[in-house]
Amino acid sequence: MDLAGVGVWSSQLRYGDPAEAAEAAAELEDLGFSALWIPDVGGPVLDSVDHLLSSTKDVVIATGILNLWMHEPAGVAARYASLAAKHGERFLLGIGVSHAPLIDAKEPGRYRKPLAATRAFLDGLDAAETPVPVANRVLAALGPKMLELSATRSRGAHPYLVTPDYTRGAREVLGDGPLLLPEQTVLLTDDRDEAHTLGKDWLRSYLAMPNYANNMLRAGFTEEDVASVSDRLFDAIIAWGDEETVLARVKEHLDAGADHVCVQVLTADPREFPREQWRRLAAALS
């Protein structure tokens, strides 16, 4: 899998109208994006992967991430093998532990020992009748122990909601070999008030999750920064402005040691496929 350059991270490709998702995925491939990433917060995510693989020819389809609490490793491995046989090795299996408030909401106390749970899930993938190749899977990772696990048990790490400074530190933990594939959220607007109106509530919902809040504290932000979604934190996490501003942030990640950056575009309507914004970014990249 060639994961160089820039990809797109999109909830719309996962949860939007399937016909438009297929059309958008084909266009994104034609625009030159190297991978299309989709989330998993419930439902048949591997059906969505199959749909996007069927709608494209060569682009990598990646889960960002498959929620390990919602799947059995043997079933994932079997489905991975069938997708590889059908489409070739274009599916990058991103795996993650999600967040305690989401998992425990349905089954209190289920979310525990996330590092051990990840190891057990990987053990299950390796023990399957047709194992998922280590080279075709990555881990969602924020803390140093999960980064270390991603370096030894997968092809690398897919950190979400991070800064270029984080990317630099993650590269030091991973070393030279493993892939580092951060997500970067962007808003294509030059208006600070508009950017903050569109992005602050979105960011606040993520910072309510302990994993992300703790990562911000490790990065040097204060508890007040996190609680208030300070301008300093907002500007560090979300790249807002014109295309050149966004691409400058992507370059910061690449210069800091990222192999690939997947860009998530926010708009006023989260259900909307941001196709015009994707086209603008592709034109700037070219």
Image (tube, rainbow, N blue to C red):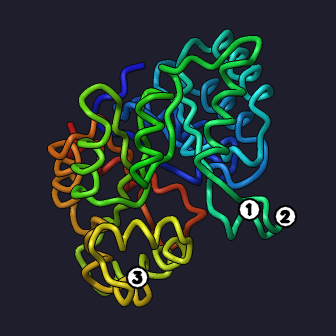
Extreme residue toward the right, this view? 107
CA distance for labels 3 and 2: 27 Å
Q: Residue at x 25, y 80 (%)?
A: 232
Q: Which residue is mark 2?
A: 107
Q: Position of residue 269 (x, y in %)?
A: 54, 70
Can residue 20 be seen by looking at this rendering? no
**Dots 2 and 1: beta carbons under 8 Å?**
yes
**Vertical placement of residue 126 versus 13, above or below:** above
Q: Quadrant of the N terminus?
A: top left
Q: Which residue is mark 1?
A: 103
Callout 1, which amino acid? Ile
Residues 19 and 126: in front is 126
Q: In the image, is 30 to the left or to the right of 105?
A: left
Tally the numbered discs.
Answer: 3
CA distance for labels 1 and 3: 22 Å
Q: Residues within 10 Å of mark 3 (few under 14, many from 20)?
A: many
Q: Position of residue 88 (x, y in %)?
A: 58, 12
